[in-house]
C-alpha cells in the first residue's frame, strides 16, 4: 500500500427491501434516490482536504448499489476521477445483489471502470435465502455470476453466511461446493449475528429462532469452511475473508492496517490522520450532506494504539513490532507485553521476531482475545 494514497468509500443506502438480519444503514424502496445522489455529489464536490490525492481503492457499498439507475454510478465515477487521481491499477469495487442487475447495467458499470464485484449470495440454499428475507434464489445468484463473467469482470467476491437458522448437516458444505464450482477470486464467509433492531432479533426474543446452531456446531462449521477453502486454494487472510493468491481486497486491508480513507454518503466513516469522522445514519443527510456528523473526533494516542492492535490482529499476517515503533515511537512489548505474552503462552498467538499473529485457534476466538487490548 502506498502510504500517501487513500481509499474512497461511497455508501448507497437503498435496497429492494430489508433483509431480516440486516443492521446496515439501508432502506427498503427507491424513494429519495435522486435527492440522495444530489447530496452525495455535493458532499464530494465540497471536499477540499483530500482533493488531488491518489486513490488506490474505491469501494461502492451499501445497501444495494446495483439497485440505482446505472447512470448514477457512471456519473459518480466521473466525479471521483475529477476529485482524485485514480490510476489504472486502482481497485474499484462495487457491491451487487442478484436479482437487481441486467446485462445493460453491467456494461455501464464495466465501462465506468468498476473492476471488482462483491456479489451478495449469502447461501446457495433456497430455504435459507427465504428465511433470511433475501429477494433472490440461488439460481438468480448463479445467473448473475455468469453475466458478470460474460461482461468481463475478472475479480469477483462472493459473500456467504454461516450459522443460519434451520440449516441441516451438509447445507453449508453444499453452499461452499456451489461457490467453488463457480470459482470466484475471493470469498467472504461471515457468521450470522443477531443484531439488535433487526427482524431476526425480534424473532429471537419471541422464541421464533429456536433452530440456531450451538456454539460447538458453529466452531465445527468454521473449521470445515477453513479446511475446504484452503484445500481449494483460497487462503484465509482475515478472520472471515479468503482469497486466491494476489486477490486479497486492497480496500479492506486499508481498514485493517489503518490506512487513510475518505467515506462519502450516509453513515460513511473517514480516517484522515488521527481524525475519525462519520456521517449521520439518518436520511437528514440529504439536506445536510457531509455536515450532519454522527461522530467527529481526534483519536488519542492510546486509542490509535488500540486500533492498531485490534484491527491488525484481524489479519492472518498480524501486527509488526517494527511498524508499531515507527507509528508510535514505543516498544510494543512495553505497552502490550502482558497481553501478548499471555496469548502466546496460552497457544493462541505466534511471534516470529517481528510480527505477532493469531494462529487458527486464536482467530476462532479473536473477539475475546482482541478485547484484551482495549
Ligand atoms: S441487501 Fe444487504 S444491505 Fe440490503 S437489506 Fe439485505 S443485507 Fe441489508
Image (cartoon, rainbow, N blue to C red):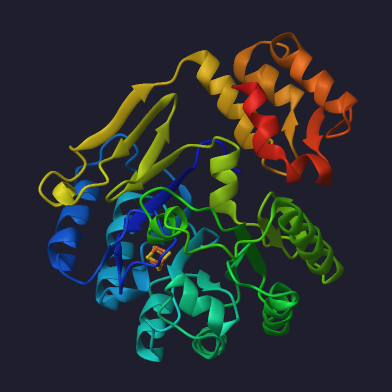
Residue drawn 53% across and 22% down? 304
Q: Position of residue 306 (x, y in %)?
A: 58, 23
Q: Nearer the viewer, residue 93 or 339?
A: 339
Q: Nearer the viewer, residue 278 or 137?
A: 137
Residue lying farthest to the left in this orientation: 287
How many numbered circles are shown?
0
Q: Nearer the viewer, residue 156 or 87?
A: 156
Rendered-image quarter of ligand 1: bottom left
Q: Quadrant of the C terminus?
A: top right
Residue drawn 73% across and 8% down? 334
Q: From the viewer's perspective, is 358 left or right of 290?
A: right
Residue drawn 27% across and 73% down? 68
Residue 117 seen anywhere in this rendered image of the structure = yes
Q: Position of residue 14 (x, y in %)?
A: 28, 66
Residue lying farthest to the front in this orientation: 207
Q: Quadrant of residue 347?
A: top right
Q: Quadrant of the N terminus?
A: top right
- Is 364 placed above or below 31 here? above
Residue drawn 21% across and 55% down? 41
Q: Position of residue 283 (x, y in %)?
A: 18, 52
- Is 3 placed above or below 354 here? below
Q: Quadrant of residue 312?
A: top right
Residue 86 seen anywhere in this rendered image of the structure = no
Q: Position of residue 185 (x, y in %)?
A: 67, 70
Q: From the viewer's perspective, is 188 left or right of 347?
A: left
Q: Quadrant of residue 97?
A: bottom left
Q: From the viewer's perspective, is 130 left or right of 277?
A: right
Amino acid at each position: 500500500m502506498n502510504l500517501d494514497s487513500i481509499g474512497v468509500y461511497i455508501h448507497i443506502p437503498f435496497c429492494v427491501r430489508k433483509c431480516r438480519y440486516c443492521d446496515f444503514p439501508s432502506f427498503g424502496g427507491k424513494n429519495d434516490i435522486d435527492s440522495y445522489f444530489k447530496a452525495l455529489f455535493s458532499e464530494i464536490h465540497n471536499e477540499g482536504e483530500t482533493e488531488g490525492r491518489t486513490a488506490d481503492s474505491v469501494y461502492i457499498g451499501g445497501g444495494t448499489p446495483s439497485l440505482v439507475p446505472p447512470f448514477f454510478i457512471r456519473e459518480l465515477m466521473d466525479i471521483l476521477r475529477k476529485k482524485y487521481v485514480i490510476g489504472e491499477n486502482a481497485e474499484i469495487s462495487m457491491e451487487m445483489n442478484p436479482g437487481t442487475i441486467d446485462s445493460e447495467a453491467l456494461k455501464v458499470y464495466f465501462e465506468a471502470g468498476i473492476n471488482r464485484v462483491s456479489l451478495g449470495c449469502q447461501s446457495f440454499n433456497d430455504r435459507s435465502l427465504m428465511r433470511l428475507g433475501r429477494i433472490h434464489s440461488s439460481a438468480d445468484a448463479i445467473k448473475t455470476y455468469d453475466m458478470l463473467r460474460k461482461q468481463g469482470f475478472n475479480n469477483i467476491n462472493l459473500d456467504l453466511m454461516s450459522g443460519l437458522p434451520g440449516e441441516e448437516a451438509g447445507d453449508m458444505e453444499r453452499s461452499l461446493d456451489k461457490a467453488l464450482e463457480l470459482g470466484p477470486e475471493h470469498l467472504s464467509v461471515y457468521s450470522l449475528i443477531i443484531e439488535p433492531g433487526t427482524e431476526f432479533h425480534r424473532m429471537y426474543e419471541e422464541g421464533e429462532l429456536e433452530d440456531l446452531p450451538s456454539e460447538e456446531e458453529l466452531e465445527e462449521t468454521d473449521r470445515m469452511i477453513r479446511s475446504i477453502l484452503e484445500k481449494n486454494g483460497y487462503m484465509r487472510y482475515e478472520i472471515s475473508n479468503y482469497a486466491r493468491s494476489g486477490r486479497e481486497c486492497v480496500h479492506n486491508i486499508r481498514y485493517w492496517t489503518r490506512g487513510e480513507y475518505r467515506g462519502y454518503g450516509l453513515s460513511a466513516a473517514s480516517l484522515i490522520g488521527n481524525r475519525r469522522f462519520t456521517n449521520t445514519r439518518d436520511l437528514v443527510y440529504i439536506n445536510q450532506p457531509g455536515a450532519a456528523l454522527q461522530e467527529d473526533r481526534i483519536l488519542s494516542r492510546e486509542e490509535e494504539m488500540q486500533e492498531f492492535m485490534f484491527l491488525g490482529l484481524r489479519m492472518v499476517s498480524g501486527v509488526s513490532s517494527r511498524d508499531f515503533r515507527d507509528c508510535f515511537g514505543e516498544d510494543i512489548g512495553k505497552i502490550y507485553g502482558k497481553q501478548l505474552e499471555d496469548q502466546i503462552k496460552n497457544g493462541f498467538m505466534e511471534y516470529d521476531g517481528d510480527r505477532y499473529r493469531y494462529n487458527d485457534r486464536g482467530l476462532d476466538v479473536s473477539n475475546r482475545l482482541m478485547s484484551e487490548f482495549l
